[in-house]
Image (cartoon, rainbow, N blue to C red):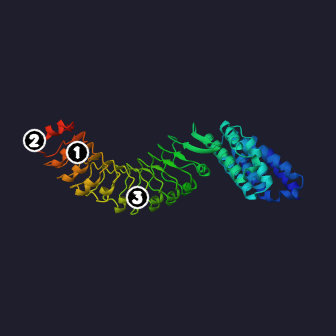
């Protein structure tokens, strides 16, 4: 049998058989022949229409999926039109995933060609987009330069962003997102029941804010590094037990929120995030911070509440921009002098640790306004605490204090003082003087 007759026999089986098995086997044979279709003369175009019809109208999702694979491998950019239609109308998760991946591959192959025809095809596809945000965005972009001045890379980015958000919208109900000049810059997957990050996100390389809080995600993929423009990553309330080393590649990241997960340690690469300003790691199981943690020189707010820390690395002294440090509910038995060198610190929370004493160097925290030392085992507060001229709130309740330092009188901005559950024998005169200064005392 010659090749054309064989193809016709296979088509007859696909069109007339009621057995998915036989139809699929026939399609798979045609798929293997996809690189040889040029030898069939005029048959190639008719085969293209045949596969398009299968993709668009066949009732069997397995057959539609196979048709998508054949179109991807055998027809490349000629498959853009039926693939785009199918992306909007397909309901099968299996087919949707194949169609989306095919569209991305086809667009990227056009970029590799870098020929005038590639640019024309990309522009044509962009003009088919009906989404309001993308249409307006493209008009804004065209106001800055002529269509012909766009590179194939710029044009492909528009299509990839469009196909990606369309796929994600069909896969996740009521997805929240923000588009700016044809680029997806914000995505919010709150309460979507995710156990892993949707792989389509990796194509949104202009993403600035990604919110994945309140899901059941257990790990981050290595491809997270592809989101090189990311500034905010919110993974609060998930089940993440480790972070990939590639997270250190997010050089523009300013906010990393991992509240209530299952982290026991952090990769050293996290210390490369030198743009990071806000890091929330509360309610995890972290026992030790990386030794070069101090490389996070732009950190402003660090929250490590309720972990398993027994010590803090000396390098933390390099965090000169740090204004808020929460180390409450850990297992610290000593307060590292490294912490007392943080001159910009405004709030320091050390509640419920195992602290026995406070170093005299505490007085060097000249910017401190809030100091929480409650629920420890502290027996004495050093007189140097009187050097904290900006201190407004001091909590030293639930300790083993017998006396208070006289220097408390010199805290001219003190507003609230918490003293309950100690062994204090304080004269009413002492408290009266403080109250006369306007201090609210809680016993």
Q: Label 1: how many residues lie within 10 Å, few (<14), some (14-19) or many (20+)?
A: some
Given residues 150 and 391, the one toward you in this image is 391
Q: Viewed as shown, does residue 1 lie left or right of 336?
A: right
Q: Viewed as shown, does residue 124 lie left or right of 249?
A: right
Given residues 359 and 190, the one toward you in this image is 359
First in sequence: mark 1 or mark 2?
Answer: 1
C-alpha gap between disc 1 and disc 2: 19 Å
Q: Label 2: how many residues lie within 10 Å, few (<14), some (14-19) or many (20+)?
A: few
Report the residue marked by disc 3. Answer: 265
Report the residue marked by disc 1. Answer: 411
Q: Is residue 225 above or below residue 95?
A: below
Report the residue marked by disc 2. Answer: 427
C-alpha gap between disc 3 and disc 1: 39 Å
The answer to which quarter of the image holds residue 139 is top right
Can the viewer see residue 343? Answer: yes
Q: Quadrant of the C terminus?
A: top left
Percent of width and height locating residue 110 = 74, 54
Of tags 2 and 3, the one toward the viewer is 2
């Amino acid at each position: 049998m010659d090749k054309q007759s064989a193809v016709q026999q296979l088509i007859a089986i696909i069109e007339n058989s009621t057995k998915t098995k036989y139809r699929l086997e026939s399609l798979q044979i045609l798929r293997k022949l996809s690189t040889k279709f040029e030898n069939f003369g005029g048959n190639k175009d008719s085969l293209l229409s045949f596969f398009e019809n299968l993709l668009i109208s066949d009732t069997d999702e397995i057959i539609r999926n196979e048709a998508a694979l054949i179109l991807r491998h055998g027809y490349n950019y000629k498959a853009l039109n039926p693939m785009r239609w199918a992306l909007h109308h397909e309901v099968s998760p299996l087919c949707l995933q194949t169609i989306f991946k095919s569209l991305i591959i086809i667009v990227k192959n056009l970029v590799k060609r870098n020929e005038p025809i590639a640019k024309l095809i990309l522009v044509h596809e962009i003009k088919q987009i009906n989404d309001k945000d993308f249409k307006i965005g493209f008009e804004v972009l065209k106001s800055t330069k002529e269509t012909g001045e766009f590179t194939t890379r710029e044009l492909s980015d528009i299509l990839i962003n469009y196909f990606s958000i369309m796929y994600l919208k069909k896969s996740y109900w009521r997805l929240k997102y923000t588009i700016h000049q044809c680029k997806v810059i914000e995505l919010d997957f709150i309460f979507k029941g995710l156990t892993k990050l949707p792989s389509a996100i990796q194509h949104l390389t202009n993403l600035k804010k990604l919110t994945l809080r309140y899901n059941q995600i257990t790990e981050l993929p290595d491809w997270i590094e592809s989101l090189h423009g990311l500034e905010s990553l919110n993974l609060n309330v998930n089940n993440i037990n480790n972070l990939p080393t590639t997270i250190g590649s997010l050089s523009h990241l300013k906010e990393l929120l991992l509240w209530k997960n299952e982290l026991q340690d952090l990769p050293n690469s996290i210390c490369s995030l030198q743009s990071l300003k806000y890091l929330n790691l509360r309610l995890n199981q972290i026992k030790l911070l990386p030794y070069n943690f101090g490389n996070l020189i732009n950190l402003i707010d660090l929250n490590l509440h309720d972990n398993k820390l027994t010590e803090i690395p000396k390098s933390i002294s390099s965090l000169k921009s740090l204004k808020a440090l929460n180390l409450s509910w850990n297992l610290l038995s000593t307060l590292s002098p490294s912490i007392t060198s943080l001159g910009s610190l405004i709030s320091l929370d050390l509640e419920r640790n195992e602290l026995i004493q406070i170093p005299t160097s505490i007085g060097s925290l000249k910017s401190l306004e809030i100091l929480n030392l409650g629920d420890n085992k502290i027996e004495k507060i050093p007189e140097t605490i009187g050097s904290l001229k900006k201190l407004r709130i001091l909590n030293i309740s639930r300790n083993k204090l017998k006396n208070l330092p006289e220097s408390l009188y010199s805290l001219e901005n003190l507003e609230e003082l918490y003293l309950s559950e100690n062994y204090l024998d304080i004269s009413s005169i002492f408290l009266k003087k403080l109250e006369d200064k306007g201090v609210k005392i809680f016993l």
